[in-house]
Amino acid sequence: MIQLPQLHRTRIGWFPDPENALADPNGLLAWGGDLSAERLLAAYSQGIFPWFNADEPILWWSPDPRCVFRTDGVHVSRSLRKQLRQSNWRVTADTSFSRVMRACAAPRAGQPGTWIGEGMIAAYEELHRRGHAHSVEVWDRGSLVGGIYGLAVGRLFCGESMFSARTGGSKAALGALCQLLHGWGFPLLDAQVTNTHLLSMGAIEIPRRDFVAEARHLATLPGVVGSWVSYPLSLP
């Protein structure tokens, strides 16, 4: 039986080498520790993220391969572009971080619960207050119709979750975010775990070793810390 490494509260920045993660379940690396801002920033800068259910200890992951978007590679269909041009939708950043997180946390059809529990929400709200976690919101006449949130570490953006209340809402949020990031010199948006929906929007898979090396480099570069509310965004 493989014994999974346990993180300790006093060694905030230490994580096992991602190459030692389990193959099954794919990417499970360690357990324990806490969700302090310092530990979360250290984790993401090493290509590691937390993902666990309410009845589990904190679990840390680094899957292989890694699902990412090149920020200039998001696919927005011709029909969606036409829909957006004809809509009254507008897009903002960091105006409703908590609402976006809680919309992402709402159980989806066919799912019994959510992995975005109150502890996760509190941790990322703290990162948002410190200027590290950000949201993009898509609005239709004051109604929130889509959004995405995640964490910026240097010039790496780590996407956590997105939601749609209307068809195309999450795709519009993702496209707008990637346009903004690409303009700032952020080459990657980490999407973590592959699924067919992400692949249909232009996500690609890269080996974990390559992703971790790039993540560690990008985390050292100067990013855009602080509120993004004043930066203009446009629909894709």
Image: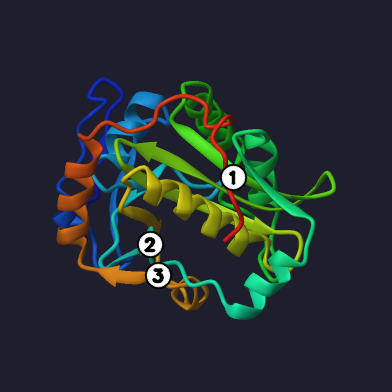
**Is residue 51 something that shows in the picture?**
no
Q: Which residue is found at the position 17% from the left and 43% from the top?
A: 217
Q: CA distance from mark 3 to mark 1?
A: 19 Å
- Which residue bears the numbered disc 3? 203
In the rendered structure, are the residues bearing label 3 and label 1 in contact, judged by CB atoms less than 8 Å apart? no
**Amino acid found under the numbered disc labelled 3:** Ala
Task: Say whether residue 167 is left or right of residue 115.
Answer: right
**Of 165 and 178, which appears nearest the observer?**
178
Instruction: Residue 128 in the image: state x and y as whole percent.
Output: 52, 28
Instruction: Residue 33 in the image: state x and y as whole percent.
Output: 34, 32
How busy is the neighbourhood of tag 1: few (under 14 within 10 Å), some, or many (20 plus)?
Answer: many
**Which of disc 2 and disc 3 is earlier in sequence?**
2
Q: Which residue is found at the position 57% from the left and 29% from the top?
A: 230
Q: Which residue is found at the position 32% from the left and 54% from the top?
A: 188
**Amino acid found under the numbered disc labelled 2:** Asp
In the rendered structure, are the residues bearing label 1 and label 2 in contact, judged by CB atoms less than 8 Å apart? no
How busy is the neighbourhood of tag 2: few (under 14 within 10 Å), some, or many (20 plus)?
Answer: some
Instruction: Residue 121 in the image: state x and y as whole percent.
Output: 58, 35
- Which residue bears the numbered disc 1? 136
Q: CA distance from mark 3 to mark 2?
A: 11 Å
**Of 173 and 62, which appears nearest the observer?**
173
Q: The C terminus is located in which quarter? A: bottom right
Q: CA distance from mark 1 to mark 2?
A: 17 Å
**Which of disc 2 and disc 1 is earlier in sequence?**
2
Q: Quadrant location of residue 27?
A: bottom left
- Nearer the observer: mark 3 or 2; the answer is 2
Q: The N terminus is located in which quarter? A: bottom left
- Which residue bears the numbered disc 2? 72
**Is residue 170 something that shows in the picture?**
yes
